[in-house]
Amino acid sequence: MSKKKVVIGMSGGVDSSVSAWLLKEQGYEVVGLFMKNWEDDDDSEYCSTRQDWIDAASVADVVGVDIEAVNFAAEYKDRVFAEFLREYQAGRTPNPDVLCNAEIKFKAFLDHAMLLGADMIATGHYARVRHNAATGRSELLKAIDHTKDQSYFLHRLNQAQLSKTLFPLGEIPKTEVRQIAEKLKLPNAAKKDSTGICFIGERPFREFLNRYLSYKPGPMKTPDGKTVGEHVGLSFYTLGQRKGIGIGGVKTYQNADGSSDAWYVARKDVATNTLWVVQGHDHPWLLSSSLTADQASWIAGVPPEAGSLSAKTRYRQADVACDIAPQGNSDFALQFMDAQWAVTPGQSAVLYDGDVCLGGGIIAGSNFV
């Protein structure tokens, strides 16, 4: 009987490298695919594509798998980057990793892998897939290593995508992944995990956005209407931001001991080009009791029933208890048991039932405490 063919996305990082080795150990015929998703400034000090390809090819050699590079830069620009810019221009803060997974890694990549004769695809994400015999559906579960779980970024996957996907790292902790890489003497065993957005890399974010967005300075105001400064363009700020606002020396409200609380970005009004700022981490304008979301995507293909679930409104956050009220297939509202801090339009609200990721949507707005 011939082996099942798995095409794995190899980024040059440790996670996908160890995943390729694990799949081979499990008896699959493994082929590596390196995705080139960005080419606007390949020669820049911030763009690591060339080194990543060298690392991926070196690992493929050690592990003993074939690898090819495929260019998805046009699809990425059209499906991910254009949407990223539209959202920022509208005053929201998008999460391009969520869009990249849905549109590139599990769509363009999946289609390409099927053309290569793949039975399945695989990536180095920390998540798990389970086939539920009772419902006949594929379920997305959190990784065993909850500190590295990436189901939040994968919540827009559908049944067709999940049923053809393997996540070899779902059952093992990150510490073990590093140990395997060292034991195999992989050339990238000590490589740092990539951070930030793939097309921005480590470069200063404001400098990057400057190249693509038109922006207009405007007033920074406090809840009582007092102007305390000028912002450089609404796109450059996100709700809950504390550093880099530019009003550090202004002490509008002082505590009894003469100290003053830090400033935070609380709201953005695109219509009047006003940035609203508040003092104090727990200011009511930073706390939301509920939110509305649109563009919902449900892994089962249908929304969950109204009732109690848990949710994340940002990636690095513990699950919080909430009640969901679906409003048709694509919109829903969440009511939180405890007020949530800096709920940000454009980010994803992702729903869970225990370890099972149900899907989610894009935060459209929230109600303050």
Image (spheres, rainbow, N blue to C red):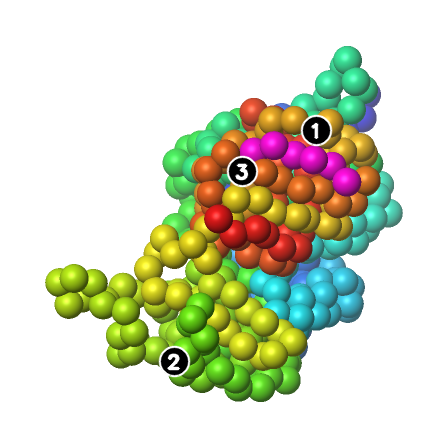
SS assignment for the magenta stretch, majority: strand
Residue hosting label 2: 228
Q: Mark 1 or mark 2, which is nearer the start of the sequence?
A: 2
Q: Residue at x 76, y 62 (%)?
A: 79
* Image height of 234 relative to 288, above or below: below
* Furthest-front residue in this view: 224
Q: Residue 199, position in %: x, y?
A: 59, 67
Residue hosting label 3: 336
Q: Mark 1 or mark 3, which is nearer the start of the sequence?
A: 1
Could you give the CA–CA distance between mark 3 and mark 1, rounded to whole angstroms?
14 Å
Badge 1: few (under 14), some or many (20 or more) residues near its Cα, within 10 Å? some
Task: Say what amino acid the circle numbered 1 marks.
Answer: Ala
- Find numbered disc 1 in the image and state the secondary structure of the residue it sits on: loop
Residue hosting label 1: 306
Magenta includes 97?
A: no
Badge 2: few (under 14), some or many (20 or more) residues near its Cα, within 10 Å? some
Badge 3: few (under 14), some or many (20 or more) residues near its Cα, within 10 Å? many
* Image height of 326 relative to 100, above or below: above
Q: Residue at x 83, y 48 (%)?
A: 111
Q: Residue at x 74, y 37 (%)?
A: 326
Q: Is residue 150 visible?
A: no
* Image height of 99 relative to 206, above or below: above
Q: Is residue 246 visible?
A: yes
Give the magenta range. 322-327
* Image height of 194 relative to 66, above or below: below
Q: Residue 138, position in %: x, y?
A: 74, 27
Could you give the CA–CA distance between mark 2 and mark 1, rounded to whole angstroms?
43 Å
> Residue 357, labelled with which disc?
none
Q: Residue 205 or 240: which is nearer the viewer?
A: 240
Q: Residue 227 or 299: which is nearer the viewer?
A: 227
Task: Say what amino acid the circle numbered 3 marks.
Answer: Phe
